[in-house]
Amino acid sequence: MVFGFGKGKIEIILEKYNFSPGDVIKGKVILKLKEVIKARALKVGLVGETRSGPQIQVGNVRTSKSSSQQRRVFYFEMPLDSEKEYLEGEYSFEIKIPSNLPTISSVPGIVGDILKGLQALSSGMIFWYVFAKLDIPSGLDISKKVQVNIG
């Protein structure tokens, strides 16, 4: 998914897509813009989300209906570069996955209670994504996310 209405794109290339808690995600972000854009920062990170709500399973493919909700249970981001004018570039990164990642049963408080209650309606999984975004102060950010498996 790329936002920014034709301003350019961000690619994320990872060494691998399957990880365990404690592993290091290694990859690179490639920025290719159509024109110079002043931005606050180029960032990369890891996010974990649950999905709750009605789902349909066809064979091995599970899809969520539009009434499903996403809840963020983990979020980490770090800068790859600072405020400047961007056009293109390649940025290597490493993200250490915490060894004590949250699970549905470890999410605290009301959100955790809701997630546990909805677990019967959903897959009970946390979906993990590596994301990159160019933080543009006067417009829509240009971003990309890639799903990874952590288990």
Image (cartoon, rainbow, N blue to C red):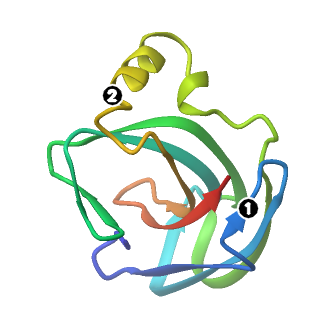
Frontmost residue, 109 versus 83: 109
Frontmost residue, 65 versus 93: 65
Q: Which residue is mark 1?
A: 19
Residue extending farthest to the top is: 109
- The answer for how far apart the CA atoms under marks 1 and 2 are is 26 Å
At mark 2, the secondary structure is helix
Residue displayed at 45% across by 81% down: 9
Give percent across and percent down for residue 114: 37, 19
Give percent across and percent down for residue 86: 58, 76
Q: Is residue 16 left or right of residue 147?
A: right
Q: For the residue marked with disc 1, what is the amino acid?
A: Phe
Q: Quadrant of residue 99?
A: top right
Residue displayed at 76% across by 55% down: 20
Where 48 falls versus 150 (above or below)?
A: above
Q: Is residue 21 left or right of residue 32?
A: right
Say which label, 1 or 2, has the lower sequence index: 1
Q: Is residue 48 left or right of residue 1?
A: right
Q: Which mark is residue 98?
A: none
Q: Is residue 73 left or right of residue 29?
A: left
Q: Quadrant of residue 120?
A: top left
Q: For the residue marked with disc 2, what is the amino acid?
A: Leu
Q: Nearer the viewer, mark 1 or mark 2?
A: 2
Where 31 falls versus 123 (above or below)?
A: below
Q: Which residue is mark 2?
A: 118
Give percent across and percent down for residue 67: 15, 42
Residue extending farthest to the front is: 59
